[in-house]
């Protein structure tokens, strides 16, 4: 009984000590925040340039017009977002070529300075790949694929804003 009482008391003291410890968050100096922000801007510029080059291709233009809304000002956006059609062979081939072309841009995200930043992009890429796979395998329609892609973009933008909130200022 005495040994049991010691174990209970010791456990309580240890748990109380753990609960009262401050979290292990590290404050980032304004100089470090500014440096991180600058690194992020450089990497995002490289990614943006890469994506812009891919979006100039005929595959990207075809995909934007017939399968997935890529450009914000796409004249077919409403039609594609509401399309009940499944992808056809020609569209699937163009989508695969477009996706393959975007693969050259993905490794650039690994140059971001913080792992949590990289993970935002990697998560987005994996989810968009799932959408494209579902579309090509005719598990979803063109409209559903566009809606899901838009949701993924929205979620990614929100997640990115959360991550970057810790690096504001400087």
Image (cartoon, rainbow, N blue to C red):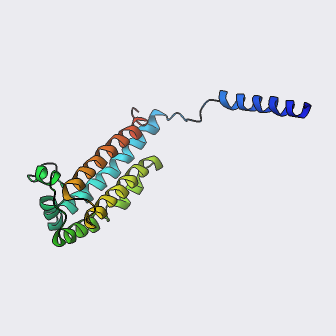
Q: Is residue 20 left or right of residue 13?
A: left
Instruction: Work out whether residue 153 or residue 86 is closer to the camera in this orientation and state it.
Output: 86
Q: Which residue is more in the foreground, 3 or 157?
A: 3
Q: Nearer the viewer, residue 49 or 8?
A: 8
Residue pictured at 91% horizontal, 30% vertical: 2
Number of marks in picture: 0
- The residue positioned 17% from the left and 60% from the top of the image is 67
In the rendered view, tell whether residue 57 sits above or below residue 5: below
Residue 47: horizontal and vertical position, in percent? 30, 55
- Residue 165 is situated, as x and y percent measured from the top left of the image, at 40, 35
Vertical placement of 105 versus 31: above or below? below
Q: Residue furthest left?
A: 75
In the rendered structure, the answer to whether residue 64 lies left or right of residue 51 reads left
Relative to 159, residue 52 above or below: below
Q: Position of residue 12 (x, y in %)?
A: 76, 29
Q: Residue at x 59, y 33 (%)?
A: 23
């Amino acid at each position: 009984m005495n040994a049991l009482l010691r174990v209970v008391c010791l456990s309580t003291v240890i748990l109380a000590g753990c609960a009262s410890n401050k979290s292990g968050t590290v404050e980032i100096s304004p100089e470090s925040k500014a440096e991180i922000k600058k690194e992020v801007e450089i990497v995002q510029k490289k990614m943006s340039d890469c994506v812009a080059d891919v979006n100039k291709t005929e595959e990207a233009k075809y995909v934007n017009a017939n399968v997935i809304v890529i450009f914000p000002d796409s004249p077919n956006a409403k039609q594609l977002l509401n399309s009940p059609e499944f992808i056809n062979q020609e569209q699937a081939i163009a989508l695969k070529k477009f996706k393959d072309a975007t693969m050259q841009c993905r490794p650039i995200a690994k140059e971001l300075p913080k792992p949590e930043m990289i993970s935002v992009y990697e998560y987005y890429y994996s989810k968009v790949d799932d959408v494209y796979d579902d579309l090509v395998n005719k598990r979803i329609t063109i409209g559903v694929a566009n809606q899901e892609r838009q949701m993924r973009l929205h979620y990614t933008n929100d997640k990115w804003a959360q991550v970057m909130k810790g690096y504001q200022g400087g």
